[in-house]
Amino acid sequence: MKTNQKVMLATLALAVVIVGIVLYMNRDTGTTATEVPQETERVYPPTEGQPMLGDADAPVEIVEFGDYKCPSCKQWGETIYPKLVEDYIETGKANLSYINVLFHGEESVIASLASESVFEQDPENFWAFNKAVYDAQPASQQHDEPWVTIDKMAEIAEATAPGVDIDKMRTDMASEESAIVQEVTRDNELVKEFGVPFTPTIYVNGVFLEDPFDYEMIAMLIEQGQTNND
């Protein structure tokens, strides 16, 4: 089979996968999403099998529900994330896990599938890929213009995650039966279960943050979590 025909078939297959995931996202399950917990409540999103930065045994867990198409997620990654890494993750006081959100439809699905493929094949370089995708996001006033494509994700993966087999990534992204499709679907279930209202949604030590950019609150909850675990 010619290369162009293979690319066309892979593209069509991915389109089918995307439509399936989007329909699954929007299906009516007959249940209501969990209410967002108040600050006094502690609800811990499960992080097993999710990308994690830092010591898995750190006393405090931070969970980010993020969407690669979200301008606020890009801003959070540029302003809060570096301080968080320096102050608490590199010091072993906390770890950070990432869960995909698909609020922006097809492009969110493509980016999430690509990130899951990177995490599956080259987990050590997941966070480099994650950052590079957000870096590639255009200015906020242009964020609704299409920019996430299979080729763009492959380009970023090649530049940031040398352990990724790009052909395998493309094949897995286009297969409804692949593990990465199942992981994206599982993430979407968690988004529904926890009633994620916006992105980024951040949990620190089981507490939902009304303002994910409130670094003082983040620091307080981390210090509180450390004290409780001493």
Image (tube, rainbow, N blue to C red):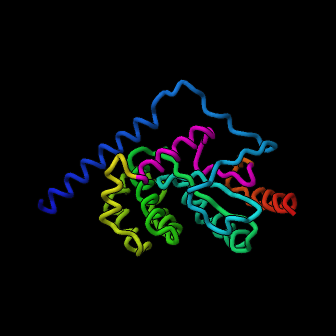
Look at the image and give the residue range highlighted in magenta. Answer: 179-206
Q: Any magenta on residue 152?
A: no
Residue beneath the point at 63% across and 65% down: 81
In the picture as drawn, the residue positioned furthest to the top comes out as: 30
Residue 229 place in picture, x, y as percent: 84, 60
Residue 228 place in picture, x, y as percent: 86, 57
Residue beneath the point at 65% across and 48% down: 45
Count numbered badges in the picture. 0
In the picture as drawn, the residue positioned furthest to the left comes out as: 2
Q: Is residue 142 visible?
A: no
Residue 85: image quadrant is bottom right
Residue 160 place in picture, x, y as percent: 44, 73
Q: Is residue 166 left or right of residue 24?
A: left
Q: Nearer the viewer, residue 197 or 113?
A: 113
Residue beneath the point at 33% across and 63% down: 168
Q: Is residue 80 left or right of residue 101?
A: right
Q: Against 185, is 142 above or below?
A: below
Q: Any magenta on residue 188?
A: yes
Q: Against 111, is 105 above or below?
A: above
Residue 41 place in picture, x, y as percent: 79, 42
Where is the C terminus found, in terms of image quarters? bottom right
